[in-house]
Amino acid sequence: MGIIRNLIVFCLLLAVILLLSGCNALVSPTEAPTALPAQTGEANATPASTVKIPNLAGTDEESAKTALLAKGLIPIVRYEESDSVQEGVVIRTEPGPGSKAEEDTKVTIVVAVKPSTPTPTPPPTPTPEPTPVAIPQGQLYLRDGNYVYFGSYPQSEVTDQSLKTALTSIAGPTSDWTSYDYYINGQASDFMVYKDVSYEGEKYRGVFFSEYRPSETIYGAHYFQEENDYYTNTIYWFRFEPVKWRILSESKGYVFLLSELILDVQDYHYSEDRITYDKSHIREWLNNNFCDTAFTSEEKNIIKTTVVDNSYNSGRDYHLALADDATYDTDCPDTNDKVFLLSYNDATNSNYGFKNFEKKDSSRIKTQTAYAKAQGAQKGYDCWWIRNPFFAERAEYISDGGLYNNQPVYFTRGGVVPALHLAISND
């Protein structure tokens, strides 16, 4: 009994001790264990060594690589063209000499190589002088499909310097050349002259002007020659070439021809007057200056004298009158001419291949020759006169895109596109 009692007492004491231990845990949490200090590196690690990059400029590539390897550096080679350093020799290092670097650092060795020889650019091939269509000897014209080559007129510019020098030498002083008698401020003047010269079987025209030709005969207006790269006090040469004519119609041994190019520029009339075609300066110029320049006596003989319709209903005014019952005094007596300008009716005649003026028409679009540009054609504006006057001191013309327009008669920018009837053989 004593043993049992002692055992019970022991168990009760043990239970009390365990109970007291649990209460302490609830009241005061167990402290976290103290962490060990973190190690920042091995206690006995050896710091990396640094070296100075040597001056290797002037050494060869292999020696430079060996020197860097001996210092524990890694050589990287890059080649650079040089005119001053011999091929295979080190120009520099990157980083440069004296710089500090840790072992196993990459160092670039820049080694010289010969500059590559560029492929020489061949000198530009000179543009050959254009070869115009030649009318066979003994023939007065050449027919080519819907075109006829007939007569000749200065057109393309001579660019060969030796030829220009020879022509200028033959031509003599410009003071002896022929005046165009162009107008400045309403007065004919000698500021622009020309000279025709034959050389080695070809014919050329020299052009010289001491002042720019105004775009109007009355007022000191714009100057288009300079815009076309033709300048004062310089001699320019132009080659006489066969005139290319488009066939508009053919009947009874004659072809109705229209120049394919704007051959010249002239005023319709040189004064600020209300003028009709029969009294206009351009009609006189066509049948004298142009005819005498473009055709020989034999060629003139096969040009038909045409009765030119200058009636009221040949021009646009007639069509306006039909629309608004207006009346303009634009008609004049018919004229008998070798060469003439198209009328409004001609330029809209579908039988000649033209459209009406409500639409652009490529068949009415013409291009200026170099000679026309030197005479003062407006750059980028390929307009050309037709023969019908308009109201006041204006006349009609074809503008850009082949459309209709009108402008003052004293404008000198109007292109000349002649027309004529030519007797032609059916052989």
Image (cartoon, grey):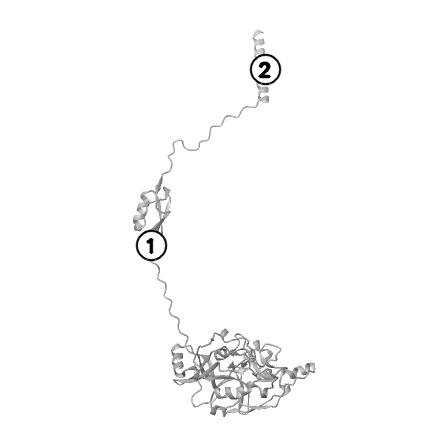
Where is residue 56 drawn, in percent x and y? 32, 48
Label 2 CA crowd tier, 10 Å (few <14, some 14–19, many 20+): few
- The residue closer to the viewer here, 402 or 424, is 402
| Residue 326, x across and y down, in percent | 68, 82
Residue kind at label 1, given as amino acid type:
Ala
Residue 256 appears in the rendering? no
What residue is at 47 percent from the left and 82 percent from the top? 193
- Where disc 1 sits, the SS reads strand
Q: Quadrant of the N terminus?
A: top right
**Any mark on residue 112, and which?**
1
Residue beneath disc 2: 16
Judged from this view, the residue extending furthest toward the top is 2
Task: From the viewer's side, name the closer residue of 367 and 349.
Answer: 367
Residue 45: image quadrant is top left
Location of residue 387 in the rendering, given as x and y in whole percent from the top left corner: 58, 84
Decide: is 136 above or below 114.
Answer: below
Could you tell me how far apart the alpha carbons at marks 2 and 1 are, in whole angstroms? 95 Å
Kind of element beneath mark 2: helix
Residue 112 drawn above or below residue 158: above
Nearer to me, 162 or 248:
162
User: Residue 51 occupies which quadrant of the picture?
Assistant: top left
Please count the marks in the image: 2
Judged left or right of residue 86, residue 205 is right
